[in-house]
Image (spheres, rainbow, N blue to C red):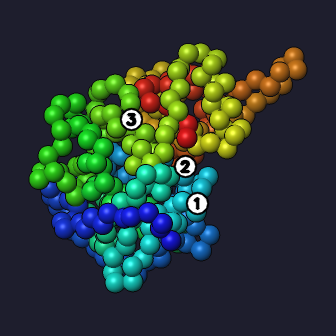
Amino acid sequence: MHTVPLKLVTIVAEPVLNNGTGLTLKSYLGNPLFAADGPVRDDVHQTGAGDCYFLAAVAGTAERDPSLIRRSIADMGNGTFAVTFGLMGGTPKVYLVDANLEINGSGNLVNAQLGHNNCIWAALMEKAWTMARPVLNVVLPNGGGTYAPSQYLGTYRMLDGNGTQNAGLGAPGGYASEFIRAEGGTINFYSNTGNSFYTQIDADLGAGKLVLVNTNRTLTSGSGLVAYHIYVVEGFTKTWINGVAVPILVNLYNPWGYSVTVSFTDFMANVGGETSGSV
């Protein structure tokens, strides 16, 4: 039960991706909100919207603190769901969404996909984020101007995160810090300066923290990574050399819905970007 005042914000218009060209809405009201063993990281699968910054943070939170996700969304029993942002601190804000999600002409979901056992929590949290994100005063994906609520509010265009500005809380472009800030938490940004970057990450993972890293805009050939994309760091595979544990592989989770392992060399050469950090 919440013990602080809640500000209720009702979505009055269904989110529409790119003005909804060729898209229709389908009700998923009969689907489970969570699977019996959920929420889990693998329930999160980014597709249409450019919101890796949001869904990576959500996936990592589901893995490390699933109770926070369960407290963040509730079935109201009347065809709507209350999604709460701000549970880490501050004053929570609640956004009401229904279970109507966009599908394309082939009947496939356009944005966040269903989780295992066809659960819908991740898709509904993404939908609510179309209304919550303006609170952060982020700017347009091209790095100019501000989002005009009358034009983008409640649409998946609000989520696109391919900006070109500098890092920071609520910074333009779409950063994992946005979700953390919306939850009332803070993110500790890393400085990508060689070995200290790895040392900070390794220590935070050992402390059970959520670690999010941003890839560079240009990657080395064959890295196996996606450029300018947010990943969850799952851990390092190490080997002993002269009595010292040396990292050789890095295990990451891509919010596109799969894990990937890259060499430590490729990780250090291509990750750090602008907004890597822990919470």
CB under 8 Å between callouts 2 and 3? Answer: no
Sort mark 2 into few (<14), some (14-19) or many (20+) by Cα contacts within 10 Å: many
Tell me the distance, in whole angstroms, between the alpha carbons under discs 3 and 1: 24 Å
Q: Earlier in the sequence, mark 3 or mark 1?
A: 1
Q: Which residue is mark 3?
A: 169
Sort mark 1 into few (<14), some (14-19) or many (20+) by Cα contacts within 10 Å: some
Residue 33 visible in rendering: yes
Q: Quadrant of residue 22?
A: bottom left
Q: Position of residue 23 (x, y in %)?
A: 20, 63
In the image, 174 versus 132, the foreground residue is 132
Q: Earlier in the sequence, mark 2 or mark 1?
A: 2
Q: Residue at x 23, y 37 (%)?
A: 139
Q: Which residue is mark 1?
A: 66
CB under 8 Å between callouts 3 and 1? Answer: no
Sort mark 3 into few (<14), some (14-19) or many (20+) by Cα contacts within 10 Å: many
In the image, 98 versus 209, the foreground residue is 209
Q: In the displayed orientation, state which residue is furthest to the left.
A: 150
Q: Which residue is mark 2?
A: 60
Q: In the displayed orientation, state which residue is furthest to the right.
A: 243
Tell me the distance, in whole angstroms, between the alpha carbons under discs 2 and 3: 18 Å
Q: Residue at x 27, y 39 (%)?
A: 138
As helix, strand or loop, the secondary structure at mark 2 comes to helix
Q: Is residue 48 above or below residue 212?
A: below
In the image, 68 versus 201, the foreground residue is 68
Indicate the quadrant containing the C terminus: top left, top right, bottom left or bottom right: top right
